[in-house]
Image (cartoon, rainbow, N blue to C red):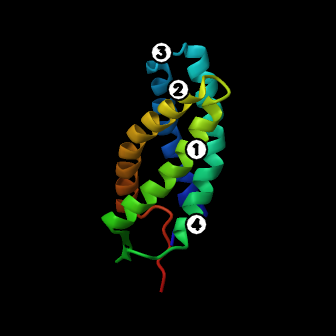
Amino acid sequence: MDTHKRTIAKTISWRIIAIIITVLGIYLFGHPWSLALSAGVIINIIKTFFYYAHERVWAEIYWQHIKKQDSHLRTFVKTVSWKIITTVVTAGVMLFYVPWKMALLSGFSINFVKAIFYYFHERVWNLSTFGRKIKN
């Protein structure tokens, strides 16, 4: 079982990666740096709270948790569940900045790239014992 300390460390490490991808993604969609930075920061503040909650929920789910590690299937399902949440948040925030078609396109595109990074972030953390309690 993951401790709160582990969840906080994972949250911080993922948010650093995620904010870089978000800001760069918005900028690469042709938006000015000021929009990319403001939207990226707002999106990631919101997602930080969702990420922590998502991690705590998954810490209580033992499906496909084998010998103190997560299976690839568990990591994949966890990635998909997280990406659904993040796509809605990203597109929702982007609606305040750009027309809805661009908000959806950027929400899906940025989160597709982040899904790949998230999966590997999870696999790396899967190897770490930092903040992990051994369940009897």
Does the CB distance between marks 2 and 1 fall below 8 Å? no
Front disc: 3 or 4: 3
76 is higher (above) or lower (below) than 71: above
Classed neighbour count for the residue bearing mark 2: other residues with Cα under 10 Å, few (<14), some (14–19), many (≥20): some
Which residue is disc 4 drawn over?
A: 57
Element marked by disc 3: loop
Mark positioned earlier in the residue sequence (3 or 4): 3
Res. 88 mark: 1
In the depicted view, which residue is nearer to us: 93 or 54?
93
Element marked by disc 4: helix
Mark positioned earlier in the residue sequence (2 or 3): 3
Classed neighbour count for the residue bearing mark 3: other residues with Cα under 10 Å, few (<14), some (14–19), many (≥20): few
Which residue is disc 3 drawn over?
A: 30
Mark positioned earlier in the residue sequence (2 or 1): 1
Identified at 37% across, 51% down, the residue is 119
Name the amino acid type tagged 2. Answer: Met
Identified at 47% across, 86% down, the residue is 136
In the depicted view, which residue is nearer to us: 135 or 82?
82
Residue 101 image offset from top left, x and y in percent = 53, 28
Identified at 46% across, 38% down, the residue is 108
Mark positioned earlier in the residue sequence (4 or 2): 4
